Amino acid sequence: MPGESPTSNSSSFNEFFLLQFAYMRELQLLHFSLFLGIYLAALVGNGLIITAIACDHRLHTPMYFFLLNLSVLDLASISTTVPKSMANSLWDNRAISYLACATQVFLFIFFFGGEFSLLTVMAYDRFVAICRPLHYASLLRNRACVQIAAAAWAGGFLNALLHTANTFSTRLCQGNEVDQFFCEIPQILKLSCSHSYLREVGVSVLTACIAFGCFIFIVVSYVQIFKAVLSMPTEQGRHKAFSMCLPHLAVVSLFISTVFFAYLKPPSISSPILDLVVSVLYSVVPPTLNPLIYSMRNKELKIALKKLISWTFFSSANISISLHK
């Protein structure tokens, strides 16, 4: 029967079995429909931001360059987990190959780590723009922005490579059923033999220290930003500065709060259902909401998006008229 897995006492198996959201066919189709709606929303939202920034020359600034990179990472991270979960529900199949699982782990950590690095870079961008405006053009030239973004991507790549290599070199002897809807390192490590996961724990501690350093950098940057904003003489200047910073601060808060709750919640409140809900919160919700958060208070981006949508509908209407002639 689909959804059942053989018992395995060694790491010689060639596939894993992911957690299903439901076993009733109607609920499986409901899960597929919900995830399809969320995925399409993320696809459209991030796709519009990427296209608007790429096509509108007025948005070719460091802030929007980093936002474009963030949207690419958001779209890539949600594409790593959600389509496979949708396919499993649609076809009533929990299996994922060993190679596909390792690839999913690598890509998810790559894009997820790159996103946190980029959010840290964006905090620096806002700090320079508000606290060091006279030095903004010299500190964040085009070449410097490309190098900073490349460093964020490279950091995510190296982090993912290290974690994936350590996790999948661990001997697994607790079966091959992953209690999560995608291949997640903590759930895979639960399948490992006693004490064979200590190397991955060491790597996780190193990653946590780096992430904590990024978090402290963001906090210190915003303390300086708020000091500078509150000392501005005009209300219009303060309003403009807050409009620049609040979307980024909201995205950072959403990202950090969901991740912290997922990995730092007390074991006493942990349960399979709660772990599943939390994993959806940190892996699916931020990539879907980020485009909405960034476009709500950003007038320049709103104008660019309206022009893009108007041009798309106008072009579609012209094509439709031409076909009917």
Image (cartoon, helix red, strand yellow):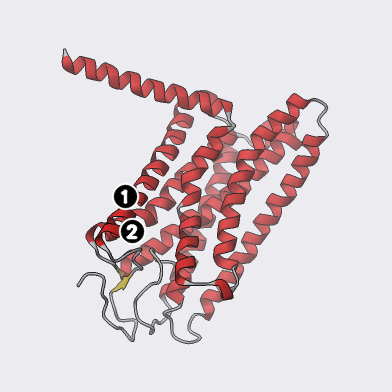
Residue 315 can be seen, yes or no = yes
Label pair 1/2, CB-CB below 8 angstroms = no
Mark 2, other Cα within 10 Å: few <14 / some 14–19 / many ≥20: many
Nearer to us in this view, 37 or 95: 37
Nearer to us in this view, 99 or 318: 318
Between label 1 and label 2, give the one nearer the viewer. 1
Residue 33: mark in rendering = 1
Label located before the other in sequence (1 or 2): 1
Nearer to us in this view, 292 or 176: 292
On screen, residue 289 above or below 180: above
Residue 263 locus on image (x, y percent): 56, 66
On screen, residue 267 above or below 64: below
Is 71 positioned to the left or the right of 81 in the image? right
Query: Hey, what amino acid is under mark 1?
Result: Ser
Q: How many marks?
A: 2
Give the distance between the C-alpha atoms of the residues marked 1 and 2, in whole angstroms: 11 Å
Residue 249: mark in rendering = none
Is 116 positioned to the left or the right of 86 in the image? right
Residue drawn 50% across the image and 39% down it? 291
Residue 277 locus on image (x, y percent): 47, 61
Residue drawn 48% across the image and 50% down it? 285
Residue lying farthest left?
325
Classify the position of the C terminus by image quarter. Answer: top left
Residue lying farthest top?
325
Nearer to us in this view, 243 or 68: 243
Residue 85: mark in rendering = 2
Query: Hey, what amino acid is under mark 2?
Result: Ser
Quadrant of residue 265 within the rendered picture:
bottom right
Residue drawn 51% across the image and 38% down it? 292
Q: Secondary structure at mark 2?
A: helix
Q: Secondary structure at mark 1?
A: helix
